[in-house]
Every structure is written in C-alpha cells, then in structure tokens.
Image (cartoon, rainbow, N blue to C red):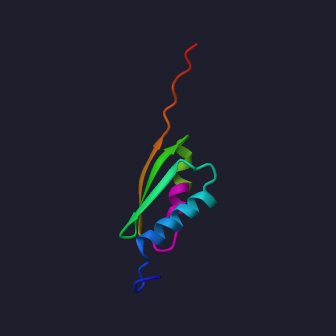
Amino acid sequence: MTLGNKVPDKTLEKNVLRMIVRKCAGSTRIGATVRDGDATVTGTIKQEHERRPIIRCVNGVQGIRRVIDQLQVEVRKPNTY
C-alpha cells in the first residue's frame, strides 16, 4: 500500500531489515528504523570496513531518502594473560 508515491515507513523498515539480512551477511547485530523515509542504522560492527557496504545496501532500498549512520565499531578488550 502506498500513499501517492510515498511508501509507508513500516514497509520501508521491513524492506531495509530484509535487505540487511540478505545482502550484508554477518550483520545480524544491525538494526534499522525508518521515519519520514530516513533510515537510521544502528548496531555494532566488528571492523570499520564493514560500515560502507551496509550503508550502501540500505541506501539502495527504493523509497529511502537518507541513511543516518549510528553504527559503532566493536571495542575489543586486550588479552590479559
């Protein structure tokens, strides 16, 4: 269901989450919410190089106007023997 040309946020959110699961393998700790067509991506990634493909993936969902990146890189504790 669309309102004019606008896709409802709940539909966009489902599409974004589905795309993350399909295209961003290993991104199970990533979430997203959509408001007024803007997707906010949250969660933890293991390494910085994972960020760009996730953002690109979300940005590729039809109807998303903008992606707000709130991803955080996992902080690894040093080994203490």
Residue reaching furthest to the bottom? 4
Question: What range of the chain is rendered magenta?
Answer: 54-63
Q: Position of residue 10 (x, y in %)?
A: 44, 69
Q: Residue at x 64, y 53 (%)?
A: 25
Farthest residue to the top: give it. Answer: 81
Q: Residue at x 47, y 47 (%)?
A: 43
Q: How many marks?
A: 0
Residue at left 56%, top 48%? 50
Magenta span main SS: helix
Give the vertical position of 21 relative to 44 (above or below): below
Where residue 15 sits: x, y (%)?
A: 53, 68
Q: Residue at x 51, y 51 (%)?
A: 30
Q: Tell me: residue 2, above or below residue 80.
A: below
Instruction: Name the quadrant containing residue 35.
Output: bottom left
Q: How far across and how far down the image is residue 13, in percent?
A: 47, 65
Q: Position of residue 61 (x, y in %)?
A: 52, 69
The answer to which of 78 and 33 lies nearer the viewer is: 33
Q: Which is nearer the eye, 16 or 59? A: 16
* Residue 50 is a magenta residue: no
For the C terminus, the quadrant is top right
Q: Nearer the viewer, residue 11 or 41?
A: 11
Examine the rendered structure and indicate whether residue 78 appears above or below residue 5: above
